[in-house]
Image (cartoon, grey):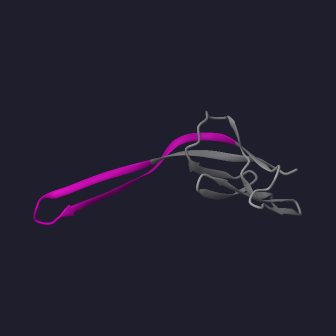
Amino acid sequence: MTDFAIIRKGLHQYSLKKGEYLDMPRIEGTVDSKIEFTDVLLTQVGDKTEIGQPVVEGAKVTCTILKQFRGEKFEAGKFKAKSRYRKQWGYREELTRVRVDEIVIK
């Protein structure tokens, strides 16, 4: 079995596997720096599965920041017929790509 964990970051929950890459909303830090997530909701390491109430005590997930970038552009707009009213806008989300290095439970 592969080691995996479910973490909570802000309002989102992510399912992470060891060695996996994941794009998340921007996390402060530089490229190649290590970050730890301690808000772990569930872990499975080997045959041992732990479910948190609400978090697993002593568990952490260590990740490396690989890249800071901007995501795909979303465009939207509105118009009113016969009045020459048009409005357009766009948005690009700031993202961080991380690699899961290790999942630790105590």
Q: Position of residue 68 (x, y in %)?
A: 55, 40
Q: Position of residue 10 (x, y in %)?
A: 60, 52
Judge from the rendering whether residue 93 lies leftward or rightward of residue 61; answer left or right: left
From the viewer's side, name the closer residue of 101 and 40. 40
Q: Please give the name of the residue rendered at 68% of the width and 34% of the height, measured from the top-left corner.
A: 33
Q: Is residue 68 above or below residue 79?
A: above
Q: Is residue 31 above or below residue 8?
A: above
Judge from the rendering whether residue 92 lies leftward or rightward of residue 57; answer left or right: left
Q: Please give the name of the residue rendered at 82% of the width and 52% of the height, measured from the top-left corner.
A: 57
Q: Is residue 96 above or below residue 54?
A: above
Quadrant in the picture for residue 1: bottom right
From the viewer's side, name the closer residue of 52 and 29. 52
Q: How many badges with numbers are in the image?
A: 0
Characterize the magenta stretch by its predominant secondary structure: strand
**What residue range appears in magenta?**
64-92
Spot the residue most to the front: 53
Q: Please give the name of the residue rendered at 65% of the width and 40% of the height, measured from the top-left corner.
A: 65
Quadrant in the picture for residue 62: top right
Q: Position of residue 36 (x, y in %)?
A: 72, 43
Tell me if residue 86 is in the magenta stretch.
yes
Spot the residue most to the bottom: 81
Judge from the rendering whether residue 13 lies leftward or rightward of residue 52; answer left or right: left
Q: Position of residue 40 (x, y in %)?
A: 74, 54
Tell me if residue 46 is in the magenta stretch.
no
Spot the residue most to the left: 82
From the viewer's side, name the closer residue of 88 and 13. 13
